[in-house]
Amino acid sequence: MPAFPSSVVIREVGLRDGLQSIQSILATEQKIEWIADAYAAGQREIEVGSYVPARLLPQLADTAELVAYAKTQPGLRVSVLVPNLKGAERAIESQANLMLVPLSASHAHSVANLRKTPDEVIAEVARIRAARDAAGSKTLIEGGIGTAFGCTLQGAVEQTEVLRCMQKLLDAGADYVSIADTVGYAGPAAVRELFGKARALAGERFWCGHFHDTRGLALANVYAALEAGVTRFDATLAGIGGCPHAPGASGNAASEDLAFMLADMGIATGIDIARLLRLRAKVAGWLSSETLHGALWRAGLPKTFAPAPTATLNA
Amino acid sequence: MPAFPSSVVIREVGLRDGLQSIQSILATEQKIEWIADAYAAGQREIEVGSYVPARLLPQLADTAELVAYAKTQPGLRVSVLVPNLKGAERAIESQANLMLVPLSASHAHSVANLRKTPDEVIAEVARIRAARDAAGSKTLIEGGIGTAFGCTLQGAVEQTEVLRCMQKLLDAGADYVSIADTVGYAGPAAVRELFGKARALAGERFWCGHFHDTRGLALANVYAALEAGVTRFDATLAGIGGCPHAPGASGNAASEDLAFMLADMGIATGIDIARLLRLRAKVAGWLSSETLHGALWRAGLPKTFAPAPTATLNA
């Protein structure tokens, strides 16, 4: 049996992937409170927003303010999504620690959503790398390969195409590469296989797994990826997000449920789960008109649950 | 990486574990329709009820009628829960194919729920075995070890105690033994470890894994048990059931979500998932006042989903 990693990072992407997918809009003050509370609960990597035109995603228009605030928290790795060079320039200017450039391995999804083919996105990553280096910036570049397990538009997506894009992203200068099951098509056998190949290809430059819980398999998929040696996962508080093609369907892996699963497995995350559940209750109050997800908040922690020894370090 | 089994049985326990845990009571005709539709969807193992006194569980009082009906379906393995020798005598008389005798590895839970210690249950299993053999009956005896990962009353439950009970159940004449996470305390690392030890101890006499989704981990736990070589899992349609200690919390693993995960992994179950989803919609109509669970029913099957070749065999 493969060994599990001793520690794992849960990157909170609720402020970006979550909030961009729902109707409710949070005020900047609420988002800052969310970041502060997540930090206090031990989260050390947060994707705070996207540098996209405000007319496209008005709910994320305050991303620069959030980066500026989040950068004041010691040891917090602040990431943003950037769709292109223009967004990357804003990320570099605001000194975000990391910028995620999304690429869709499904050509149909890529053209429909990003208005670029995968190879055009890769060429843009090369320009972003050149701009980053020319600016002497330390902002890391992550190439995130989405629709890696299939696509609601195109249908099947070949593993060979995912791995081809991954190699080209690395060659183009992405510091790290990641895999996302954008539409919730992944199952754990496919995850084990593709993430295993991706880890073999990218080695330590493989960064993160991103799973949606559309069909209830997000945590099983995380488990399969853990066995393939993946040590960082995206998740959203209360599982917010969702699939626009399936109204009411579950969103991302829920941060609090994932934190519980990892703690139960003896894997350190630095997260104080009780504190994260209090933050969940607060955010649930702000998002009272939305369908939220996750199971732990209702059942509570088991009587036998003992927090991992590292949890208090970051509290 | 461990190989996955090529086929797995999903035993439907919604008519027993599901219906005994919720307020709604289904009419016998509805239960018969459920059994008929589940059979038509390819399910070949169904726990139809319990032989317990009707005053304790009036909603399961029609178990003998259901066994009689289910026995008319060719190739359907009909199982019932029996808490003691008296129930076992009814199971033998009705010619159920299998009777599940529950044992709680938590002494506190055992005494509170079954009014017997684990060793008293084991002694009862020996009496059941003697009665079965004296009757020349073919009804199989399954010893099901519950609260195997902890207990809401007692707290921690030691693996050594679970394995001790398992060996003694086998010695007492149980044909098969199973493990249940009765209260939803299990995580996949613990599952992989305990089920691995159980399989090593019981070999082919290890029968079934039973997981509750109380904290969202049921399918991750199934995945971990698959890696330990387990090939049979209990589940309930729409995940009905639940934990009396956590109102509104998720119930059992949802049969339809589990069937989807296994099919996606290339593991044959014989189940026609689209048909099972239609049955789910029907049962959801009958149970309109209950909180139901599962994710697949809302999102639907992926565009890329191809039913396993064996699915049509049983349709």
Image: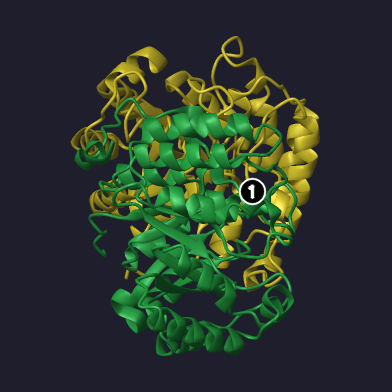
Chain colours: A yellow, B green
- Camera-side residue: A164 or B250? B250
Determine whether B7 is above or below A55 in the image: below
Q: Quadrant of the C terminus of chain B?
A: top left
Please, what is the three-letter code of the amino acid marked with disc 1? Ala
Residue B98: image quadrant is bottom left
Q: Quadrant of the N terminus of chain B?
A: bottom left
Q: Which chain is mark 1 on? A: A
- Callout 1: 10 Å neighbours few (<14), some, many (20+)? many
Q: Which residue is mark 1?
A: A295
In the drawing, does residue B122 fall left or right of residue A195? right
Q: Residue furthest top?
A: A55
At 26% across and 48% down in the image, what residue appears?
Answer: B268
- Camera-side residue: A93 or B251? B251
At 40% across and 28% down in the image, what residue appears?
Answer: A131
Whole-percent x, y for residue B199 in the image: 35, 76
Residue A13: image quadrant is top right
Whole-percent x, y for residue B158 in the image: 57, 83
Whole-percent x, y for residue B73 in the image: 34, 46
At 40% across and 84% down in the image, what residue appears?
Answer: B134
- Camera-side residue: B5 or B234? B234
- Camera-side residue: B177 or A251? B177
